[in-house]
Amino acid sequence: MSETEKKANFDISPSDRTEAGYGKPSIYSHPHPQTGDSCFFELPPIAIDQPCDSHPRVYWQATDDVDVFIWINNKGRCIMKVLIAESGCKPPITDNVFPGQSKLFSSNCLKKFAIECCECEPVKVNCLGIARIFVKC
């Protein structure tokens, strides 16, 4: 198991958690691409602003397994590595979101997700972006 995969298991102390977000939640009636269900609750957007230090920060954690879509928009100049932990013994979902790029992730048993900021140029910049989470009603 690589070092990044070990980090994806989220052995992160509570003090490393990033608390961010604003706005009001809303409910959207967009059909789920696989199930056809049409009710998703949008959580307040989460601002991503963290140092480029290759340490993952937990941005959202569920108390129970949830069916979600997570949309990540990288507005900075660093690569964001998205780490999504699911319940059970599944390996974490990991993927890169490059500067200027947006990606949509889906999980039907999400436990938590984190961002690891890496490969920043210049070195002293932060990862910047936004995350939007849509939870199945």
Image: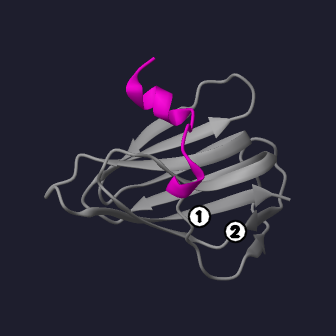
Query: Pointer 1: residues within 10 angstroms few (<14), some, or many (20+)?
Result: some
Amino acid beneath label 2: Leu
The residue at 82%/48% (across/down) is 36
Q: Residues within 10 Å of mark 2 (few under 14, many from 20)?
A: some
> How many badges with numbers are in the image?
2
Distance of label 1 from label 2 (alpha carbons) = 7 Å
Residue 112 lies, in percent from the top left, at 64, 46
Considering only vertical position in the picture, is 89 above or below 70?
above
Give SS at disc 1.
strand
Residue 70 colored in magenta in the image:
no
Q: Residue tagged by mark 2?
A: 43
Quadrant (top left, top right, bottom left, bottom right) of the C terminus: bottom right
Q: Quadrant of residue 38?
A: bottom right
* In the displayed structure image, the side of residue 90 where residue 124 appears, left or right: left
Disc marking residue 70: none
Instruction: Locate residue 110, reporting x and y percent.
Output: 70, 43
* Label pair 1/2, CB-CB below 8 angstroms: yes
* Element type where label 2 sits in the image: loop
**Image coords of residue 86 (percent x, y):** 68, 35
**For the view shown, which residue lies furthest in the top direction?**
1
- The magenta region covers 1-16
As drawn, the residue found furthest toward the left would be 122
- The residue positioned 46% from the left and 50% from the top of the image is 115
Among the 4 quarters of the image, the one containing residue 85: top right
Q: Residue at x 49, y 57 (%)?
A: 72
Decide if residue 129 is on the left or right side of residue 35: left
Which of 28 and 135 lies nearest the eye of the viewer?
A: 135
Q: Which residue is mark 1?
A: 132
The image shows residue 34 at horizontal and vertical percentages of 75, 41
* Residue in front for this viewpoint, 12 or 129: 12
Which is nearer the N-term, disc 1 or disc 2? 2
Could you tell me the amino acid type at mark 1? Arg
